[in-house]
Amino acid sequence: MKDTAESKEHQLTVALRIRPLSDGEQEEAATIVAHRLDEQMVILMDPMEDPDDVLRANRSREKTYVFDVAFDYSASQEEVYRATTKGLIEGLISGYNATVFAYGPTGCGKTYTMLGTDKEPGIYVRTLDDLFRAIEETSDDMMYSVSMSYLEIYNEMIRDLLNPSSGFLDLREDAKGEIQVAGITEVSTINAQEIMELLMKGNKQRTQEPTAANQTSSRSHAVLLVAVKQQSRCRDVLQEVRFARLFMIDLAGSERAAQTQNRGQRLKEGAHINRSLLALGNCINALSDKNGNKYINYRDSKLTRLLKDSLGGNSRTVMIAHISPASVAFEESRNTLTYADRAKSIRTRVKKNLINVSYHIAQYTNIISDLRCEIERLKKKIADQAGCQLTSDRTDIRHVQGEAPRLPCANNLC
Ligand SMILES: Nc1ncnc2c1ncn2[C@@H]1O[C@H](COP(=O)(O)OP(=O)(O)OP(=O)(O)O)[C@@H](O)[C@H]1O
């Protein structure tokens, strides 16, 4: 087996989404201080007006930030998906790893963007729908296997959301240096509806509690991992196999204990969430260091270990930062914008994950038996299609009968 792909540099894509003013913020008579100026620019205005404050007198009250793309309350789920994630799918089925993660303070719309609602589904569903459509479109020439895992990192412990009774899981590095979650459930299906049901079920297992800032606050980082393996249906002496992993991550809120009035268990969770997010922040700082000589400590938290490739390795990565537009959330918004702004300069090195498998004579018996199955599958498909057309349209019958059956390929083995 031989690794054949070359790598190229890819810049982290950073998107910013400003959610609508919430009912709570309206009741507090909050004003809007974060505005989208155009497709890429947002402005944040300091709501504090104190002419006697000499320290503030010379400070500009507003700051603009530029991102790859910016959305406000008017952006639909489809628009956000198209501008951030849709473009990763083609790469994914060609063997490029990808990551999309939602970042921001509690209650600012991360789960809304990633999971969404039944009526307004988010990035998870839209991505899986398009991935399966792309697979369907090329399935005459390519064979795919897709598996999905769903986990949460809660208080620095990893739980399998598809099988929560399996206890806490460990991270291991495989021979290629990729981080794997030992013992995680992998569901193999290319049925989007089935996956959605699993996701919804898994999401009910996610640790959620009301905090003062969000009634259904996610207390954990949730990670949906989709692994795609692809190879040509034409079996040859030299066979190319492509692998790619897509991480879709809904981070827990980057909150301050004082703001969410957390006590006891919630306060402990906050410390763990902040440990992961602090580690993530440190990695982002080190990775975005202009001189590139800062040490990057991925080992500081489970989240950063899992995201090692997504941040500093082989992955096309998109960060979607979320803020509230409200004056009462000014400090949190400013911190998030600074964080996201820094992430813009991160570069990863992406390369196609391919291996060339050379077949030996002994393996030809297997290939021949695979080919026989494939011929049976195609014969059945042709027969099914002919059956359908016979019943649906009599004028088409002659055309279907006269058409030569399409062979899988012109290769000398087929
Ligand atoms: N763009 C949006 N349009 C309409 N409603 C939104 C939008 N973003 C968020 N909301 C609503 O705001 C509330 C909080 O959003 P959400 O639960 O997604 O926040 P979160 O960032 O995931 O919070 P936490 O970190 O606490 O889990 C929800 O009721 C959600 O429906």
Image (spheres, helix red, strand yellow):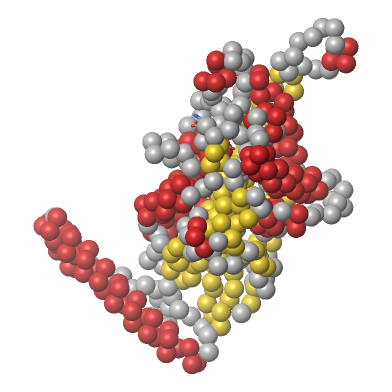
* Residue 75 place in picture, x, y as percent: 51, 29
Q: Is residue 386 above or below residue 372?
A: above
- Name the residue furthest top: 51
* Residue 370 place in picture, x, y as percent: 39, 81
> Is residue 261 visible in the rendered structure shown here?
yes
Picture residue at 53% right of the left edge, 42% below the top: 208
Quadrant (top left/top right/bottom left/bottom right) for the N terminus: bottom right
* Callout count: 0
Q: Is residue 414 above or below residue 156?
A: below
* Residue 339 place in picture, x, y as percent: 73, 37
Picture residue at 66% right of the left edge, 18% below the top: 327
Quadrant (top left/top right/bottom left/bottom right) for the C terminus: bottom left
- Name the residue furthest front: 264
Q: Is residue 333 above or below residue 377?
A: above
Picture residue at 69% right of the left edge, 61% below the top: 7
Taking 100 as reference, is 294 left or right?
A: right
* Residue 270 place in picture, x, y as percent: 67, 41
Taking 273 as reference, is 345 left or right?
A: right
**Quarter of the rendering containing residue 295:** bottom right
Picture residue at 39% right of the left edge, 51% below the top: 197
> Is residue 8 visible in the rendered structure shown here?
no
**Quarter of the rendering containing residue 69:** top right
